Image (spheres, rainbow, N blue to C red):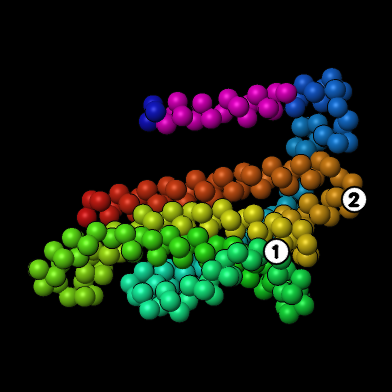
Amino acid sequence: MRRDIKHLAGGVVFPAAILLLWWLGSDQNIWNAYVIPAPCKVIKALKDMAIDGSLIHHMGASFFRVFTGFAISVITAVPMGFLMGLSSRSRRWFDPTLDFLRHVPPLAVMPMLILWFGIGEISKIVVVVMATFFPILLNTQEGVVSCDESLLEVGRVFRMSRRRRFREILVPSALPSILVGMRLGLGYSWRSLIGAELIAASSGIGYMIHDAEQLSRSDVIVAGVILMGVIGSLSDWGFLKLSNKLLSWKEGS
């Protein structure tokens, strides 16, 4: 507990110094208030959007797209990672195509997605899936391939069925790598989604920033950037806590 408090206190020092510098610079008119709005203006912009309901609306739209795309990636990438980790034949079949798709930036296909699906939810969810699928897939595959062969041999010696070896040896061994891939994918999902919402959307945090740029509302832009950082950090923190609980349960069992 004391260590966590010290870690939190150490992590607050640098952001607090930046906030103090920001406030002093705005108060002393060191820079243009339009280019870098004062902290009080940013806070007021967040408060106004929270009161009129637009903040919740945009956050809800972004959350829905992120977690829908992320869930689709987990459901598809984890089984495929196990398949490719266990079967060299499947790797020969899928590797060339997946390697090609992995190097295509999700936002590069956004114009085609708009033509196919419009600016509705599907195009943004597809971008999130493209951004999150490969980190989860590759880490799952690596976790399966790196499973200690001696553990599997022990399972064979004790005449464990193939299903039981998979459930009690292979899955627990690959779980840390899977969780790392999911954590990376969750971070990539926010980055890709905001970019997609900046290009074509009628709601979401990215759209809120784009709309503020059109209206020359730099305070809303800064508020949106800060909001993205806070949401992303909280999502990562929550997933890390969940991962630690899963891993501690695995070790205990």
Front label number (2 vs 1):
1
Amino acid type of the residue that numbered disc 1 sits on in the rendered structure: Leu
Q: Please give the name of the residue rendered at 45% of the width and 63% of the height, measured from the top-left corner.
A: 138
Picture coordinates of residue 120 (x, y %)? 73, 72
- Residue 16 seen in render: yes
Q: Please give the name of the residue rendered at 77% of the width and 21% of the height, measured from the top-left corner.
A: 24
| Residue of label 1 | 107
Q: Is residue 69 left or right of residue 157?
A: right
Q: Is residue 30 left or right of residue 167?
A: right
How crowded pointer 1 is (Cα within 10 Å; few <14, some 14-19, many 20+) is rated as some
| Residue of label 2 | 215
Q: Please give the name of the residue rendered at 77% of the width and 77% of the height, measured from the top-left corner.
A: 115
| Rendered position, 25 above or below 110 | above
Question: Total number of numbered labels?
Answer: 2
- Residue 62 seen in render: no
Is residue 163 one of those drawn in magenta?
no
Q: What is the quadrant of the C terminus in the image?
A: bottom left
Amino acid type of the residue that numbered disc 2 sits on in the rendered structure: Leu
Label 2 and label 1: CA atoms lie apart by 24 Å
Helix, strand or loop at label 2? It is: loop
Picture coordinates of residue 105 (x, y %)? 65, 63
- State the extent of the magenta-drawn residues as a range: 4-21
Q: Is residue 20 left or right of residue 239?
A: right
Chain-order first, disc 2 or disc 1: 1
Q: Main secondary structure of the magenta part?
A: helix
Residue 219 is labelled as none
Q: Please give the name of the residue rendered at 21% of the width and 71% of the height, measured from the top-left corner.
A: 164
Picture coordinates of residue 229 (x, y %)? 64, 44
Say whether marks 2 and 1 touch (CB < 8 Å).
no
Quadrant of residue 59 in the image?
Answer: bottom right
Picture coordinates of residue 53 (x, y %)? 74, 54
